[in-house]
């Protein structure tokens, strides 16, 4: 394994380990491992984020799939904070919420 590849593997393991610790906290309790990762990206200047009311939506990238293989068949992840708890939601729920706010 090249030094670059080994370094990248180490970074992936570190990100995943941090997320696994986070989902044990009250804020992310019982959520998928990738939820804290996406929550941390919501203000990232290098990442496209769709915002629907209180929901942040992300396109799943090839890099995301390397870190979280469970996203292999996913195109979008949407997360929101409710009463201090962060959880995954569906883009459809976000679209509905946005529509209701306009009425």
Image (cartoon, helix red, strand yellow):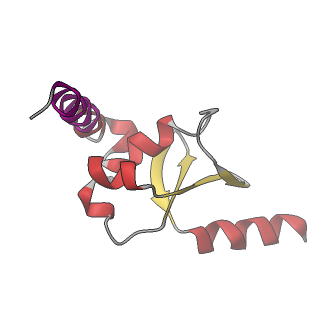
Magenta span has 97? no
Frontmost residue, 69 versus 27: 69
Considering the whole magenta stretch, tell me its main secondary structure. Answer: helix
**Count of labels in the image:** 0
| Residue in the image at 83% along x and 64% along y | 101
Residue 24 in the image: x percent, y percent? 24, 38
Frontmost residue, 42 versus 82: 42
Residue at the far front: name it: 2
Q: Quadrant of residue 93?
A: bottom right
Q: In which quarter of the image is residue 62?
A: bottom left
| Residue in the image at 31% along x and 45% along y | 29
Residue 21 in the image: x percent, y percent? 23, 33
Q: Quadrant of residue 36?
A: top left
Residue at the far left: name it: 1
Q: Can residue 60 be seen in this view?
A: yes
Magenta residues, as a range?
A: 3-18
Q: Is residue 59 left or right of residue 101?
A: left
Frontmost residue, 14 versus 22: 14
* In this view, 47 is above or below 21: below
Residue 85 in the image: x percent, y percent? 47, 43
Residue 99 in the image: x percent, y percent? 80, 71
The quadrant of the rendering that contains the C terminus is bottom right
| Residue in the image at 28% along x and 46% along y | 67
Q: Is residue 30 visible?
A: no
Q: Is residue 6 left or right of residue 65?
A: left
Magenta span has 13? yes
The quadrant of the rendering that contains the N terminus is top left
| Residue in the image at 26% along x and 29% along y | 11
């Amino acid at each position: 394994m090249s030094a670059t590849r080994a370094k990248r593997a180490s970074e992936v393991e570190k990100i995943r380990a941090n997320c696994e610790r986070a989902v044990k906290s009250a804020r992310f309790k019982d959520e998928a491992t990738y939820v804290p990762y996406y929550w941390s990206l919501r203000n990232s200047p290098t990442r496209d984020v769709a915002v629907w009311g209180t929901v942040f939506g992300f396109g799943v990238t090839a890099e995301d799939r390397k870190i979280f293989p469970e996203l292999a068949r996913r195109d979008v992840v949407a997360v929101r904070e409710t009463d201090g708890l962060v959880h995954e939601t569906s883009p459809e729920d976000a679209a509905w919420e946005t529509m209701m706010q306009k009425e």
